[in-house]
Structure formats: C-alpha cells, structure tokens
Image (tube, rainbow, N blue to C red):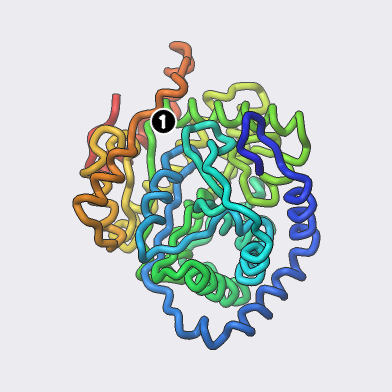
Amino acid sequence: MSQGAAIEVSRFDDWAGGLAAAWQRLFVRLGRIEAGWLAGRLRAIPIDRPIYIAGMARSGSTVLLEMLEQHRETASHRYRDYPFALTPVIWNAFLDRAAKRSMEPVERAHKDRIKITPDSPEAVEEMVWMAFFPHAHDPAVDNVLDATGHHPEFEAFYRDHLRKILLLRGGSRYLAKGNYNLSRLGYLLRLFPDARLVVPVRHPVAQVASLIKQHRLFVAAGRRNPAVLRYLQRLGHFEFGLDRRAVNVGEHGAVERIQGLWQAGEEVRGTAASWASLYGHVAELIERDPRISRQLFIADYDELCRNPGNLLARLFAHCQLDITPGQLATHAARISSPTYYTPKFSVAELAAIREETDEVYQRLCALAGSPPTT
C-alpha cells in the first residue's frame, strides 16, 4: 500500500492480493511444500519464548513492535511479506532478486508520524490465522480461542511458519503484533507455554478519538478506491474502514449493541463500548488465570509517554531481552505524546466514554499497578 498523501493500493498489490485470497488453499499447500523443502533447517530452529503484542488498534502497539524488533534476537513479519505470507521464504527469495532499489521511509497511511519501508515490521501474521479459521472475524461467532482450542492442521503449519520467519530474519525469538490475538491469549499459551504476552492499553478518551479518526480516514479512502477495502480485508484489518467489525469475545449481546450503535451513527459510544468489551475480556483473563497473569505485561501508553525509560526497561525485562542503558535511552528519546491531533469531544460524548469504559479502565490500571490517567 502506498503511504503518500493519499491512501493507495498499487495495481500489482491489488492483483497479487486477489490471487493470494482466491487461491488460499493452494498457498496453504505450497506453504507445506516449502516447509518440507526446508525440513532439515526448520527442525534445527527452536521456538523459544515467542513474544506477542496484542492490543486494540491505536493503543501504541506499533511503537512497541518497532522497538522490540530492533533487538538482535527478535524476528518479525514485515510489510514485504504481503501478499504471499503463507510462503514467506519463496516470496522473499523472489523479492530479493527482483528488488531494484531501496526505498526511503515515508509516513504510513494512518498519518500518525510513524515512517515505514517495505522492511518495517507489520501485523501480517493475521493472514495465516484467516487461512485456517475462516470465521475468525465473523461478529456473529465467538472469536475466543482458549486453552481448550485444538486445530492440529493449523498448529503444525503455524509452528513451521514461525520457524520460517526466524530463518528468514536470522533471529532466535519470534515477535508478532496482532490486534486479534487479544481473543487468543489462552490458546497461544497452550501452544507456547513460555510465550511472553504484551498488551498495550491507552486511556479510553485518547484511544476512542484515534480509532474514530482512523475510521474516517479509511472510509474516505475506501470510497475513493475500492482496492483499499480489498487490501484491508485480505490483510485481516477490520478495526476501521468500510468493513469495520466488532470483535466477539463471547458476548453476543455486546457485539450486537456495538454494531447497532455504529449503524445509528453513535460513533463515540459504540467505539467506547468496543474498547470496554475487548479490554474487559483481557482483565477477566488476568484475574481468573494465574498463568496469563504471570506472563502478560500491560504496557500503559500514557505511562510510556510520561516516563518512557521506566516502562521500556520493564517491558524488555518482561520479554527477557537484554538492553543496555544507551539502547534504552535511544528508544526513550523517540517517545512523545501525539501532537498531530487533539480529541474534540462534547461534554455528552466524554460522559458516554466514561460510562462505557471507566469500570474496565480502573481494573486494568489496578492490574498494571499504574495510577489512572485523568
């Protein structure tokens, strides 16, 4: 996707993305063939303490991903892995031969100061989940995968896929950002009992404002160019845009209410209710499951902006990644509160956000051991 003044999708990306989507089962088979071809090398690669960043969109997850991805041990998906993410080794080998020149970093389509290139880390992993869980984004279906989940075909493919990313990127620790992994935390810990979970949380007022801003941006882009909608659907981004969908975490009534609010034009309350549903699910998991509580780190975005050095030190320690004081200072210097937009809610809208989110926000702050932001 082009990241210039307008959100655009190149003809090649649209065509290739359509090919990958239309022939998804073929690419799954090709992925297995690729794994067989690499079997000897993949068997020698352990999946050691994978790191999963799983937060609702606009929570600061990309900033955390970029910092953790710079560590010498980590390996992640990149923008260049789209659209043939199911066969990453073959596709990257082709790109390495076809690449003509390096690209200068440009601001991504979200217009949020984050500059990227095709080699920047990105949440491409969702394409693998969608290939095996066709109802993963159906609001009418419970999207939660817990420790009782069982899908041998997916699990074998997924483990090989993680090893392929480690092989490609030369890392020893797999790192993924996936918003929808919020509904899969129990399942991920069953697959990888030593996984490290990171859940970024942002003050609801700021996060609701950012989500609405992004939704309007991508709706406008999708109306100008239908390829934008197709790109988001194929990549597995349903957080905003013309095909925005609520995530069902086992609360069918909540999903129906959220979507009803959106359809009625009550953007603020609907988005706040979505925030409360997702993060309420996380709070409940932490409170009832000691294993998740031990291995999950709540990354408070507001604390990250106020005191980046302290939060980043705790984050790297939780992920069991060493970091020098100099590296920590370099990362911390990049952090600042957003200044490119200011939430402009009415008194009634602010009251609606508080009504929907305050109870969950207080619980999360208590679990994180950080004071609530006023």
Mark 1: which secondary structure?
helix
Q: Image quadrant of residue 357?
A: top left
Q: Is residue 16 visible?
A: yes
User: Looking at this rendering, what residue extends furthest in the bottom direction?
Assistant: 40
- The residue at which mark 1 appears reads as 204
Rendered location of residue 21, percent (x, y): 75, 57
Residue sitting at the far front: 101
Residue at the (58%, 55%) spot, across then down: 124
Mark 1 surroundings within 10 Å by alpha-carbon count, few (fewer than 14), some (14 through 19), many (20 or more) = many
Q: Is residue 261 above or below residue 170?
A: above
Q: Is residue 103 above or below residue 128?
A: above
Does 57 sit left or right of 240 as displayed? left
Answer with left or right where residue 155 lies relative to residue 222: left
Q: Quadrant of the C terminus?
A: top left
In this rendered view, identify the residue nearer to me: 13 or 141. 13
When the figure is inspected, residue 303 is found, relative to residue 145, above or below; the finding is above
The residue lying at 40 percent from left, 63 percent from top is: 74
Q: Which quarter of the picture shows residue 343?
A: top left
Estimate the x, y position of residue 273 in percent, counting from the top left. 50, 32
On the question of residue 131 being in view, the answer is no
Depth check: 75 or 372 in front? Answer: 75
Total labels drawn: 1
Q: Measuring from the top left, give residue 65's x and y in whole percent.
A: 42, 51
Question: What residue lies at 42% left-to-right and 26% top-to-bottom?
Answer: 205
Which of 277 and 301 lies nearest the eye of the viewer?
Answer: 301
Dot 1 amino acid type: Pro
Q: Quadrant of the N terminus?
A: top right
Question: Image point 51% across, 48% down: which residue?
Answer: 179
